Image (tube, grey):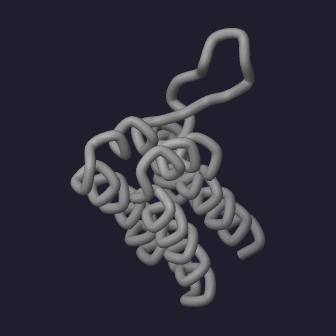
Amino acid sequence: MVHAETLKKLNRLRVIAKFMDSGWGIPFTKVRFGADAIAGLVPGFGDAGAALVSLYIVLEARKLGAPNHLLVKMLANIAIDTGVGTIPVVGDLFDVFFKSNIKNIDLLHDFIHKK
């Protein structure tokens, strides 16, 4: 059984991930985007700032006992998101559809519930 404090922390991290990846929707579509996509519009600093928030999620995953192979997958998702996100226009569109924070929370969720 998963400890109540662990579930609380996981839920708090999920709120951050949703804010970063899918906090708002485009009316009359199923397309959602978050602060990551908006921050990406600020050249240089936006993607770096979003990456720092993403790294916070990985740090918390480590504190929750996530194994190294899982942390590497999470870091790879962030690297892809940040790397492609730096490309003008293409990166901004990519940020709308590649939801690295939600992917990472799903990985962490699966790990915690299988543990």
The percent position of residue 71, horizontal first and vertical second, equals: 53, 80
The percent position of residue 97, horizontal first and vertical second, equals: 64, 44
Of residue 41 and residue 19, the one placed in the foreground of this image is 41
Q: Is residue 52 left or right of residue 113?
A: left
Q: Is residue 95 left or right of residue 52?
A: right
The percent position of residue 87, horizontal first and vertical second, equals: 44, 57
Name the outermost residue toward the left: 45
Quadrant of the rendering where the C terminus is positioned: bottom right
Of residue 74 and residue 112, the one placed in the foreground of this image is 74
- Asked which quadrant contains residue 48, the reply is bottom left
The percent position of residue 52, horizontal first and vertical second, equals: 31, 61
Residue 4 visible in the displayed image:
no
Image height of 26 relative to 19, above or below: above
Residue at (57% x, 68% y) in the render:
77
Image height of 65 relative to 2, above or below: below
Residue 3 visible in the displayed image:
yes
Image height of 61 relative to 34, above or below: below
Residue at (57% x, 57% y) in the render:
100
Quadrant of the rendering where the N terminus is positioned: bottom right
Q: How many marks?
A: 0
Residue at (61% x, 78% y) in the render:
73
Of residue 102 and residue 4, the one placed in the foreground of this image is 102
Q: Is residue 108 left or right of residue 36?
A: right
- Asked which quadrant contains residue 30, the reply is top right
Residue at (58% x, 86% y) in the render:
67
Name the outermost residue toward the top: 28
- Asked which quadrant contains residue 106, the reply is bottom right
Name the outermost residue toward the right: 114
Q: Is residue 66 left or right of residue 48?
A: right
